[in-house]
Image (tube, helix red, strand yellow):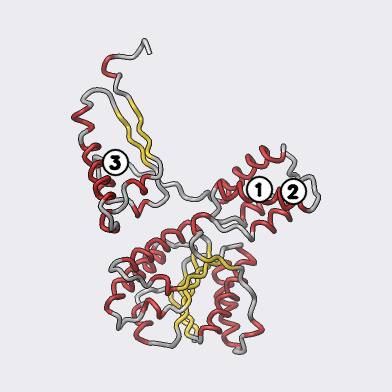
């Protein structure tokens, strides 16, 4: 402390954890307290330079819901820099697993192939991987084993949902080829799955069948892909997007696609697509445009996503909305 200069006396770092709970988007809140808190924080941050002309104060906020923050906080002069931490990739997951296993098993994990576990835990965060190891240790203990092996981890993995998409439904796909009677459809299913498995670039498939057949087709495609890529199979019931308030549907679609970006490669199935994509519904027209924008973005950015959407009938009006997307295919 004796070496501090006078102008350094105001050095400080202010860290606000879970910033979204303190400063939510004012347009999305219905109470009176939240807007007042946001306004007060904005005023305090704007006044820092005047209050502390010498020295330096750094304000850091953290959130896992950046879209929920009030937009005024994210302009220059308040939070100038945004750093986004995506879920770890396969190499990072392997290193995290290695550190955790060294800590929790005293290095006794020679029977575990870290490459296989890392490959099959797409979308897992560090906390998810820690849960995987804890549950694997418990599973091994209940079976009377003194240490965990790879089979323990693979069994437990199926019961853990990645934090990034916990509110969505991840299913284990099943091969339903025997229940699909049309041989031409089966051939197309195999071709789609093979093309994506060998070259995982964005593809958008419309399935114009009855809902049960569409479910079987989607599950079979995901099953065939997962055999090679171990990609998660995300099933989205599109009725969840129908919201009462204007703009809520579009926001839900944005949240979904932003999360999908962190799960690549993956297979996503929109069940009963008509529920949000009826062109005659003026209230949902903005949702359709939001969805199309993301489809075009995904195709332009070469994302590793196979997007399957079922529609209850071969409606040319719906299909016409997507004709500008050059990665579309239709199963009728």
For numbered disc 1, what is the local secondary structure? helix
**In the visual, does 277 lie left or right of 32?**
right
Residue at (29% x, 66% y) in the render: 247
Residue 94: which disc? none
Of the residues under marks 3 and 1, which one precedes in the sequence?
3
Circle 1 crowding by C-alpha within 10 Å: few under 14, some 14–19, many from 20: many
Q: Nearer the viewer, residue 50 or 95?
A: 50
Q: Spatial distance from mark 3 to mark 1, Cα to Cα?
A: 38 Å
Residue 80: which disc? 3
Q: Position of residue 111 (x, y in %)?
A: 76, 48
Furthest residue in direction left, as rendered: 50
Q: Spatial distance from mark 1 to mark 2, Cα to Cα?
A: 9 Å
Q: Nearer the viewer, mark 3 or mark 2?
A: 2
Residue at (72% x, 53% y) in the render: 139
Q: Position of residue 9 (x, y in %)?
A: 30, 19
Q: Position of residue 308 (x, y in %)?
A: 49, 74
User: To which quarter of the image does residue 255 belong?
Assistant: bottom left
Of the residues under marks 3 and 2, which one precedes in the sequence?
3
Furthest residue in direction top, as rendered: 2
Q: Nearer the viewer, residue 283 or 296?
A: 283
Residue 133: which disc? 1
Of the residues under marks 1 and 2, which one precedes in the sequence?
1
Residue tagged 2 = 148
Residues at discs 3 and 2 in contact (Cβ within 8 Å): no
Residues at discs 1 and 2 in contact (Cβ within 8 Å): yes
Considering the image in quadrants, where does the N terminus appear?
top left
Q: Nearer the viewer, residue 313 or 113?
A: 313
Residue at (49% x, 64% y) in the render: 168
Question: Vertical placement of 196 versus 149: above or below?
Answer: below
Q: Spatial distance from mark 3 to mark 2, Cα to Cα?
A: 46 Å
């Amino acid at each position: 402390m004796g070496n501090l200069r006078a102008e350094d006396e105001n050095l400080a770092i202010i860290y606000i954890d879970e910033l979204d709970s303190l400063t939510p988007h004012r347009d999305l809140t219905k109470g009176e307290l939240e807007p007042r808190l946001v306004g007060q924080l904005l005023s305090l941050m704007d006044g820092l330079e005047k209050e502390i002309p010498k020295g330096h104060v750094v304000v850091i906020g953290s959130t896992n819901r950046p879209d929920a923050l009030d937009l005024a906080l994210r302009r220059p002069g308040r939070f100038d820099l945004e750093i986004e931490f995506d879920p770890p990739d396969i190499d990072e997951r392997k290193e995290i697993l290695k550190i955790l296993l060294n800590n929790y098993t005293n290095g006794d994990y020679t029977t575990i192939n870290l490459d296989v576990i890392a490959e099959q835990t797409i979308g897992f965060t560090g906390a998810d991987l820690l849960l995987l190891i804890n549950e694997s240790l418990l599973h091994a203990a209940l079976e009377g084993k003194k240490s965990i092996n790879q089979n323990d981890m693979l069994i437990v993995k199926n019961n853990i949902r990645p934090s990034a998409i916990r509110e969505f439904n991840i299913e284990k796909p099943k091969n339903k080829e025997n229940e699909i009677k049309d041989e031409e459809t089966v051939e197309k299913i195999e071709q789609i799955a093979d093309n994506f498995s060998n070259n995982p670039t964005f593809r958008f498939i419309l399935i114009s069948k009855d809902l049960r057949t569409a479910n079987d087709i989607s599950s079979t495609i995901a099953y065939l892909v997962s055999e090679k890529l171990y990609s998660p199979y995300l099933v989205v019931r599109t009725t969840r997007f129908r919201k009462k308030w204007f703009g809520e549907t579009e926001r839900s679609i944005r949240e979904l696609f932003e999360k999908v970006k962190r799960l690549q490669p993956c297979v996503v199935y929109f069940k009963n697509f008509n529920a949000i994509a009826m062109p005659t519904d003026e209230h949902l027209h903005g949702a359709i445009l939001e969805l199309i924008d993301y489809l075009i973005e995904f195709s332009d950015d070469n994302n590793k996503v196979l997007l399957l959407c079922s529609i209850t009938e071969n409606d040319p009006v719906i299909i016409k909305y997507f004709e500008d997307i050059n990665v579309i295919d239709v199963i009728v």
